[in-house]
Amino acid sequence: MAHSPSLARAWIGTIVFLFLAPGIVAGLVPWLITGWQWHDWGDAAWIFLPVGWIFIALGVAFLLYAFALFAVHRGTPAPVAPTQTLVVTGVYRFVRNPMYLAVLAIILGQALLFGSWWLVLYAGIALTAVVAFVKGYEEPTLTSTYGEQYLEYRRNVPGWWPRLTRWRA
């Protein structure tokens, strides 16, 4: 039987990975691109700024929630320290890749706040890289690890466009 890490170790690993992966992709890189310099939207600020903040707030909330589910399942989202069971609870009942979507929402929210087309381009590059990673590594690995359980999940829960109702396994 495989060793199940302690809950404390799972939380620590999850938090470390949160800062290393999304922290860099959705925090450090956007800062390097924009310096987090506010854009003067003038009279249009009443729409762009709230929408930007909503994207960021929802992205952060969903990202933290999705990360927490991995710790609760005694693992991390990091490929080097995965969970022993397939995580198909919470937000994962609506979409298979909520963390990636959350990171993209955070980046696009910052693009609105800082008026940066460079961040929009970066979001497109990040999406391309993520889809390649998911197709080339994640899906084959999950298929070989969890077999029919993952295939059933994949048949019922979309990867990128959330379901309107939660999937019940």
Image: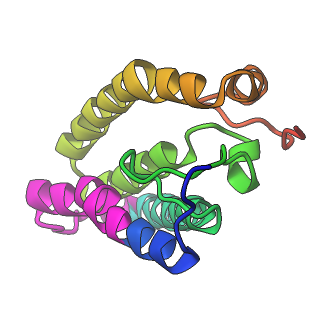
Q: Position of residue 103 (x, y in %)?
A: 41, 51
Q: Position of residue 65 (x, y in %)?
A: 60, 65
The reply, left or right, for residue 7 in relation to residue 125 is: right
Q: Position of residue 133 (x, y in %)?
A: 36, 28
Relative depth, front residue between 84 and 34: 84
Relative depth, front residue between 124 and 45: 124
Q: Position of residue 116 (x, y in %)?
A: 21, 49
Give the answer, above or below, for where 114 lies relative to 142. below
At horizontal 22% and vertical 68% (from top left) the residue drawn is: 38
At horizontal 30% and vertical 64% (from top left) the residue drawn is: 42
Residue that extends furthest to the bottom in the rendered view of this protein? 8
At horizontal 42% and vertical 54% (from top left) the residue drawn is: 81
Number of numbered discs visible in the structure rendering: 0
Give the answer, above or below, for where 134 lies relative to 110. above
Relative depth, front residue between 110 and 32: 32
Relative depth, front residue between 84 and 155: 84
At horizontal 75% and vertical 52% (from top left) the residue drawn is: 89
Magenta region, residue range: 16-44
The reply, left or right, for residue 129 in relation to residue 47 is: left
Residue that extends furthest to the front in the rendered view of this protein? 1
Give the answer, above or below, for where 138 lies relative to 6. above
Q: Is residue 21 magenta?
A: yes
Quarter of the C terminus within the rendering: top right
- Asked which quadrant contains residue 149, the reply is top right
**Colouring chosen for the image of the structure:** rainbow
SS assignment for the magenta stretch, majority? helix
Q: Is residue 154 magenta?
A: no
The reply, left or right, for residue 132 in relation to residue 95 is: left
